[in-house]
Image (tube, grey):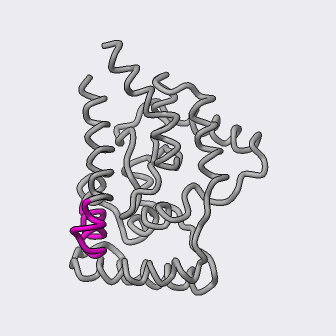
């Protein structure tokens, strides 16, 4: 029951934030809140890791899946590489919370059926209508300006800033988590649309709580 309550609170607060911030709070405040939330959960995040959350919020899981068999094999391989995860089961991306990072531990624990999870992931990938890289570059510039104003003393901030700027100038946008983040937090998740999650996956948290 407590797990379900925590999930509801995370999702409810995220949804409330979207509604409330759009009318009462500025873009800068929403970005600050997103950064603070990530650093509270993942204190060793670098600018690269913060960037990853914001670009996932715009671009979702990434490119269209042309080979679902390959995507399934990759998921199977990742599922076999870990036993448990202490990271949140579900957490919103970026400042608009268009997508959720949904932990693969939900499949391992049997809370969400494999096929249901995979189908939601594939649908999330294939339903994306991403911005142009140029538009994203402009938005990231505004986001990065806010992060800079927060005086966070992030490790390798300038190096990451230059690397990200070079990436965007080359017409690209995707990055991996930093090596420190990977080593410390061992992330295992898939990016799923908030709307698809609420329509297809959230019911499993209700069902699991009713069995307690």
Q: Tell me: residue 84, above or below residue 124.
A: above
Asked if residue 25 lies in the magenta stretch, the reply is yes
Q: Residue at coordinates 42% horizontally, 83% vertically from top-left?
A: 141
Q: Nearer the viewer, residue 51 or 140?
A: 140
In the rendered structure, the answer to whether residue 80 lies left or right of residue 18 reads right
Q: Tell me: residue 212, above or below residue 152.
A: above
In the rendered structure, the answer to whether residue 114 lies left or right of residue 185 reads right
Q: Residue furthest top?
A: 211
Q: Tell me: residue 61, above or below residue 160.
A: above
Q: Quadrant of the N terminus?
A: top left
User: Residue 101, percent across and down?
Assistant: 45, 48
User: Residue 20, percent across and down?
Assistant: 25, 60
Instruction: Place residue 71 in its image quadrant.
Output: top right
Can residue 43 be seen by looking at this rendering? no
Q: Residue at coordinates 74% horizontally, 43% vertically from top-left?
A: 68
The stretch of residues the image draws in magenta is: 20-36
Q: Nearer the viewer, residue 45 or 68?
A: 68
Q: Residue furthest front?
A: 23
Q: Mainly helix, strand or loop, the magenta region? A: helix
Can residue 11 be seen by looking at this rendering? yes
Q: Nearer the viewer, residue 52 or 9?
A: 9
Q: Residue at coordinates 32% horizontally, 58% vertically from top-left?
A: 18
User: Residue 168, percent across and down?
Assistant: 56, 81
In the rendered structure, the answer to whether residue 133 lies left or right of residue 110 reads right
Q: Quadrant of the C terminus?
A: top left
Badge count: 0
Q: Residue at coordinates 60% horizontally, 77% vertically from top-left?
A: 132
Q: Tell me: residue 212, above or below residue 82.
A: above
Instruction: Place residue 160 in its image quadrant.
Output: bottom left
Instruction: Place residue 88 in its image quadrant.
Output: top left
């Amino acid at each position: 029951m407590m797990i379900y309550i925590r999930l509801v609170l995370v999702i409810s607060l995220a949804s409330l934030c979207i509604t409330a911030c759009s009318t009462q709070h500025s873009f800068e405040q929403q970005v600050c809140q997103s950064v603070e939330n990530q650093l509270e959960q993942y204190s060793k995040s670098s600018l690269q890791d913060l960037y990853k959350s914001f670009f996932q919020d715009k671009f979702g899981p990434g490119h269209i899946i042309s080979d679902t068999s390959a995507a399934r094999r990759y998921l199977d391989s990742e599922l076999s590489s870990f036993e448990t995860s202490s990271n949140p089961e579900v957490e919103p991306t970026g400042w608009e919370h268009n997508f959720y990072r949904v932990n693969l531990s939900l499949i391992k624990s049997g809370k969400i059926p494999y096929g249901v999870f995979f189908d939601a992931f594939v649908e999330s990938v294939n339903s994306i209508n991403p911005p142009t890289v140029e538009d994203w570059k402009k938005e990231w510039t505004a986001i990065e300006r806010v992060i800079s104003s927060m005086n966070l003393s992030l490790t390798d901030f300038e190096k990451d800033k230059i690397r990200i700027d070079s990436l965007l100038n080359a017409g690209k946008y995707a990055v991996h988590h930093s090596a420190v983040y990977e080593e410390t937090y061992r992330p295992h998740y898939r990016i799923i649309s908030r709307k698809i999650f609420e329509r297809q996956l959230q019911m499993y948290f209700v069902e699991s709580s009713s069995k307690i």
